Every structure is written in structure tokens, then in C-alpha cells.
Amino acid sequence: MKKNKKKLGNQVFSLADNIVPIIFIAFTLLGFVLTKNVPFNFFISELSSRFYRNAFIVLSLIIPVIAGLGLNFGIVIGAMSAQLAIIIVRYLSIEYLHLSGTMELIFCFLLTLPIAAFIGLLTGKLYNKTRGQEMIASLIVGFFANGVYQFILLFATGVIIPVRSSHPMIKPDGVGVRMTVDMGELHYSLANILKIPFMWVVLIISLSLLVLTIILFLKDKKFGKKNNQITFYIKTIIFAALSIFSIFSIITKSKINLVKDVPIATALFIALLCVFTELIMKTKLGQDFRSVGQDQHIAESNGINVDKTRIIAVVMSTVLAAWGQLIYLQDMGTLNVYGAHTQIGMFSVAALLVGGASVRKATVSQALIGTLLFNSMFIMSPEIGKAAFGNALLGEYFRTFMVYGIIGMALGIYVWNANRKARITLDPIDMQTQDN
Amino acid sequence: MTEQNVVKEKDLKDSFLAKAIKTIGLPTLIIAAFFLLVILTAAFLKQSLPILFSDILRRFGMNGLLVLAMVPAIKSGTGPNFALPLGIICGLLAWTIGIEMGFIGLKLVLLVSLMAIVFAIILGYLYGKLLNAVKGAEMTIATYTGFSTVALMALVWLMAPFKSKQMGWMMGEGLRETIKLDGVEAAQIFNNFLSFKVFGINIPTGLLLVFFAFCFLVWLFFRTKIGIAITAGGSNPEFAAASGIDIDKNRIIANILSTILGALGIILYSQSYGFFQLYSGPLMMAFPAVAGVLIGGATASKANISHVIIGTFLFQGLLTASMPVANQLFEGTDLSEIMRVILQNGIILYALTQVKGGGKE
């Protein structure tokens, strides 16, 4: 009886914990109720293509969170490194090399690595100097880097670095890179490698998950392990229903087949990063990330080089974010040189938080769910604004508010809880010193 | 003998330089030197110095109050007020209501200021409460409090039932992004008060008077009993708590004051510009103000009125002066804007590295 009560309490607690995801699901559903003119296949198309674009960057935020650095708004620097790499590769490709799209993409990935790693190293060192204030430092360092980025591209290019003024990427007066740069063959260079119709992918995934669930269930039963039968049945029913639905829609050629094809290479990259993030946590380095994230004193006294571990986490995050930005940009026809990176930090952090992550806890599934939920809100917001108030602009302002509000609320609740706990465990004098 | 002299001289020079760095602060010195260099370049390029100095004075006066708003927050120990948009929103809301009510001229400005103070007291109180709940991460939370308030107000600007022709679109609903003040006879109302010319330099007397008056008032406030208690709570909380000072209450009072200064600051700022901007206009306005006080020699935990005056003059002066110079030297580039971004955020980062605390120490 007592045990049951505790369990119930846990469930209520988890409801309060997951209030943000719940709000987002409710919001999207409300959108469907209010706006009768948003076709479901349009929504799924939009959502899936946004998911392939953004998931990689959101995943790149996980490692710094676990290493105790909080939400790394500094991933915009990674995004800028990727854009620098694209500009360099595109410039050289047009001028001398005349590479194919795939080759350009490979060069971009290779060139991004050293640039992002070097800048990640510098920002990591900065975070070690601004200990305890990493999040505000990461926000400001993003703004700062944006200034340096503009200096390099708007001024140094042409004045310090010699470029051909008649080059299509350079402004007519010979100084600075243009506002927009054509992605040329880079456009869809990753996405077009292999594409499979959406419903076939749903069918394959749901069937394999169904089989997996059943196998696991039988295995547990064989070894006499106690398992949760209700979740098993729910899972089985969902996966079976999805399989049947996809078979049915493929046969009847229903409207849902209009959903855009799945870019398998992009999806594979995202899957690989998920596996990588899970695996690295099982290595010595991953354990170090965890212990540094939990308590820097204890980690230090256990012989872990705290500063170095934190820098490694930041370098990894920056490089991954840079590659994520490459994946994002190859999906676009043109590169918005001075604007493509500015919002990416806030949006990615908001997406991660929407998935249920916090300043000290983030998982792969939270990142993936968060990306889906956040983008659903993003798609539905203007539609709701239009339907409910006759003004799409209102919806756009609303979603901007949601981005900032979610981040602010998540940070506030986290610090408030941490301070409350500190007050319970520490005596007042200790509490005061910690405040400083 | 001579050698000894040289050594002595060098020692003297070193110690003088070291002393200067210690008392004035390295960033302040660097910016000051840079400022001087830009002014000299402007003179060398034969640009009109009187116009340049007039602009510098105007920009100095109009930004001053916003930078002054940092002082109470820093002194109380909550760090630079990154939630300055909160105060700015109060000022903007007061402007729109004042114009909607149909007032013009001085009456409008006084009414708007009064309303702004009332709004700022309410919002500042709530904001102070919030900061007390999130001790240790005030700067990050403050930034997002500012951001989300600005975003929320965008919805208000769009939906508020304002009717005034001065502020609405020709068609459709909502307020315009930029609202001009010359239509309500409030543009440059302080700037033109008793203004005169010396050597061709236009002195905006009223603007500077208002700014210096508020500097004096804030200086005075921090000499009263409550002001001293706020400073004590900020610089040494253990000691202050032990001597019976209610630190939490003082932090709230300081942040109300900071929000009021922000609200009045935007009123002074926009009357000088001749217009004010709604929607995302105030979003990033905290950062130049924070950078201003830091350039003057303040840190995240110490600030004085002198830091405000020196910092605002150097930072705004440098930005104002560098624009025509950079345009003449490198035509078609936006070098001064790039420089602003780098300087402003560089100085904030530098100040953050000086903040003590965090997990390892």
C-alpha cells in the first residue's frame, strides 16, 4: 500500500516535471482544432523536414549539459565556423577546383572540423575562466563572435584577404562577401544521396520496433523478470497500428503519401550521433563528464583534470553543432551569410528544454522529442494566430515569446529549486558564501 | 650616474603606469586611448570637429540614464541589470498611453514620466522578488526576463486597442514599429531647453542637466541610511546579514530604482532621437548600457557614478566619432557597427571573467 502511494506521488511529480512538453502537445492539438485548413500531410511534411534539419544541432547540446556547463548558447560559434567553411569551399570551388556537390560537402565537413575545434578550444578556456556564469558567458561570446565573423567576412575579405572582385560571391565593389550566397551543387547534396517514401520508412521502423518489443518481452518472461505488462501492450498496439496504417495507406495511395520523402543519409547522420552520444557516456571520458558535472571538487580530488574535461566537452559540442549547421544549410538553396546562425542557439536550446531537459540533465530522447514538439509549435503558431485573431503576425510574435519564455522559465525553475535544496542542506553562513 | 637615473626614471614610469592601470583600470585606459586616436584621425581627415563634438555630447546625454540604471543593481549585488528592457518597456508603455490620451509637449513628457515611474515600481518589485529566488544566476535569468518581456509586449503592441492616429498604421490593427515624437511636440524637448553654442558646438543643456541631476540624486541616495545598507549588503553579505540588514528587501529596492532609471532613461533617450521603437526595438538595449558602465571602470560587483559618466562618455563618444571616420577611410563598410559589437561584448566577457564563484573555487 505504502509502495503504491509512493508510486502515485512519483507520477504526479513527473507530471509537474513534464509540464512544458504537455503544454506544447496541447498547443499543437489546439492548432488542429482551430485551423481546419491545415492538412495533416502538410503538417507532417513540414515537421519531418524541419526535424532532419535541426535534430543534429539540438543533439550537440547534450554533452555540455552533462559536463555541468549548462545550456551552451555558444553553439552559434560552431554554426559560424560551418558557414565560414562553406564560403571558403564554395569560393575555391567556383574559382579553381570546380568540384561536384558531394566533393564540396566532404570538403566542408573536413574544413569545419579544425575551425570549429580551435574556436571550441578558445570558448572552453573562456568558460573555465567564467566558472559559474557559463550560460551568460556563452550567450555573450556568441554575440562577440558574430562581430568577429562580420569583421572577417565584411571587411577583411577584400581589404586584408585578396579576392577577385568579379567573383559571384563577392560584393561588386570588391570588399566583403554578399548577403546571400548561392549553395550551388551543395544544395541537397546530403539529402539527395538516397530518398525513401515516408510511409515505407514508417512501415519499416514500426515493424522492426514491434518485433523488438515482442522479443524483449518474451526474453524477460523467460528469465522470470517482472515486467510492466501495460506498457508492453500499449507499445505493441501502437506499433501494430502504425504498421497496418502505413500498409493500408501505401496500398490505397491516400493523401498521406504526399509527405516528402525521407533523406536517408541525413537520418543516418542523426541516428549515428544519437548512438555516439549514448556510447560516449559509457566510456571513461563520459564518466568524467558526469562526475565533473555533478561536483567539480569531488571530480578534482578523484584525479580528474576538470578544466581539460570541460574543454573537451565544449570542443565536441562546437564541432557537432558546426556539422549540424552544415546538415541544416545543405537543405537550403541559399546561404544567408549574416543571418543563418543568429537564432540557432536560442531555438536549439528551447527545443531541448521543451523535450523535458534541464540545465543539468539532458538525454537523446529528450532532444529528439523536443525537436519534434518545438517545431510543431513553430509550424502551428502563425496558423493559430490567423485562425483565432485573423493575424499571422500575432502567431509569429507569440512563438518568439514562447522561445524566450521557455528558456527563462526552465532556467528560473532550475535555479530556484537548486537554491531551495541548498537552503535545506546548508546552514545560513554557507548559504551566504555560495550566493556570492 | 646617468645609468642610475635612467633606471630610476624607468621605475618611476613603470610605477606610474602600474598605478594608472590600477586606479583607472586597463579597459578604460585602452578605450580612452582608442577614443583619442579616432578624434585625432577625424581632425587629420579634416572632418568638422564642432559637429562631431555636438553629436558626442548628445549621444552622451541620451544614453546616460540607461547606463546609470546599472549602478543600483550592481551595488546591491545582483550584478549589472541585464533586464533593462523591463524598465524600457515601462517607459514605452507610458509613452503610448500618454500619446493616446492626447497630451502634447511638456505636459505629455511629465505625465509620461510619472506613469513610467508607477509602472517601473510595480514591475521592479516583481523583478526584485524573482532575483531573490534565483540567487547565484541573476545575470542569465535577468537576460531572459528582459527578452521574454519584450516578446510578450510585442503581442500587446499588436493587440492593444489604441486609436491615436500618431501611432497606428494607415490600415489594419496594432501600433507602428517606429513612432515619431515631433507630431506631439515632444521631440528634443529637453535637448533644446536653454541650449546654446560654444565654438560651434551645440550644448544640449536641458538633456545634460537632467542626466547630471539624476546622477546627483542617485549619489545622494547611496549616502542615505538605506543606500549605505544596500551597498553593504552587496559588497559583504555575511557581514551585512550579521549586522541585521534585510538583504533581500534591499535588493528589491535597488532593482526598483534601477527599473525606474531604465524607464526614465528611455524617455530621455527617445525625446532626443525624436522617435521611439516598439516591438523588438528594446530587445538588445541592455548590452550597450552594461558595456558602458563596465568601460567606465565598474565591475560586476562594484560601480560608482563616476564610472557611469566616464564610461558613457568614452563608449558613446568612441562610437559616434568612429562612424564618420570609418566611413571616410573604408567606404561602404559598416566598420563602426562591427566595432561596437566586438567592443561591447568583449568588455562584458572581460567583466564576466572577473566574477568570482562557481563550482571549483
Image (tube, coloured by chain):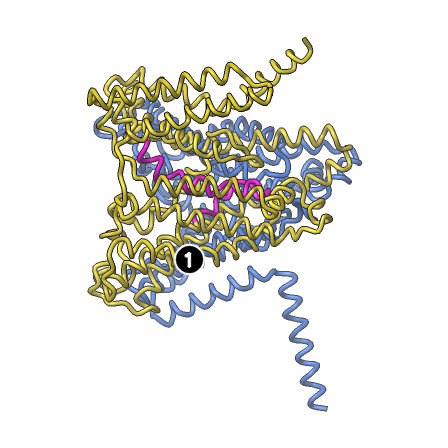
Chain colours: A yellow, B blue
Q: In the rendered image, which quarter contains the C terminus of chain A?
A: top right
Above or below, B190 relative to B27: above
| Residue at (24% x, 46% y) in the render | A333
Amino acid marked by disc 1? Val
Q: Is residue A66 left or right of residue B242?
A: left
Q: Is residue B271 above or below residue B172?
A: below
Residue pointed to by mark 1: A148
**Where does the N terminus of chain A fall, quadrant-wise?**
top right
Between residue B43 and residue A156, name the one nearer to us. A156
Farthest front residue in view: A222
- Who's the residue at 31% across and 22% down the image? A384
Q: Give the prevailing secondary structure in the magenta stretch.
A: helix
The residue marked by circle 1 belongs to what chain? A
Q: In the rendering, at what x and y percent does residue A228 appear?
A: 55, 17
Quarter holding residue A7: top right
Q: Secondary structure at mark 1?
A: helix
Badge 1: residue crowd in 10 Å (few <14, some 14–19, many ≥20):
some
Examine the structure image and report whether residue A326 is included in the region drawn in magenta.
no
| The residue stretch that appears in magenta | A48-76
Q: Is residue B356 left or right of residue A200?
A: right
Determine if the magenta segment contains residue A62: yes
Residue B254 placement: quadrant: top right
Q: Position of residue A115 (x, y in %)?
A: 43, 58
Report the residue at 67% width, 31% height from top.
Answer: B248
Whether residue B51 is visible here, answered yes or no, is no
